[in-house]
Amino acid sequence: MKQDCVFCKIVAGEIPSSKVYEDKKSLAFLDISPINKGHTLLIPKEHYEDMFSLPDDKLKELSAVLKKVSKAVIKGVKADGLNIGMNNKSAAGQIVFHAHFHLIPRYKNDGLKSWPQDKYENTDEMNKYKEMVAKSF
């Protein structure tokens, strides 16, 4: 547990939450500022800052829970679909630095649009970015 982490405090019971699922290693609760009602956060109970610090075995376990909780969110709120997101690092919008997934119920007419899209100038530029990523493994 990290002393100044709000999610660790929720796990410890120091801060209340609207829990929808809990097991020995994970916890899911409603987001207090939902994009759509039923917006749920899934966290590992152990503190990991983001996906990159989350060990592979823990991520694998959490992904099985992610699937289970996602199905329950869709069924429970009668959603037409679901977005699953994870913000990693402040530049990506991470506010609470405890690894967590957002499960956002979606409806056909909820007014939310897809992400904005950009374009590569040409094939050469696309290949440049492909190489930058491919070389980083």
Image (cartoon, helix red, strand yellow):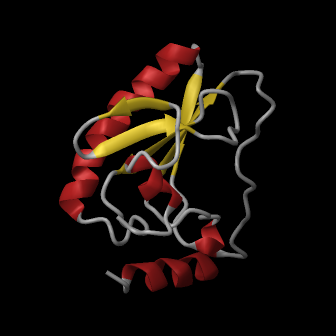
Can you give x and y, in whole percent of width and height, for residue 26 in the image?
31, 44
Can you give x and y, in whole percent of width and height, for residue 137 in the image?
31, 80
Can you give x and y, in whole percent of width and height, for residue 65 in the image?
30, 37
Name the residue at 62% across, 67% down.
Answer: 92
Placement of the N terminus among the 4 image quadrants: bottom left
User: Where is 118 relative to 75, above or below?
Assistant: below
Q: As rendered, which of 101 and 84 lies closer to the eye?
A: 101
Name the residue at 38% across, 79% down.
Answer: 134
User: Where is 136 relative to 61, above or below?
Assistant: below
**Count of numbered circles on the image:** 0
Can you give x and y, in whole percent of width and height, for residue 13 in the image?
42, 45
Q: Report the residue that reaches farthest toward the left.
A: 57
Name the quadrant containing residue 69: top left
Q: As rendered, which of 75 and 4 lies closer to the eye?
A: 4
Q: Report the residue that reaches farthest toward the front.
A: 14
For residue 27, side relative to residue 109 (left or right): left
Name the residue at 22% across, 62% down.
Answer: 56
Name the residue at 52% across, 38% down.
Answer: 17
Q: As rendered, which of 20 and 94 lies closer to the eye?
A: 20
For residue 111, side relative to residue 74 (left or right): right
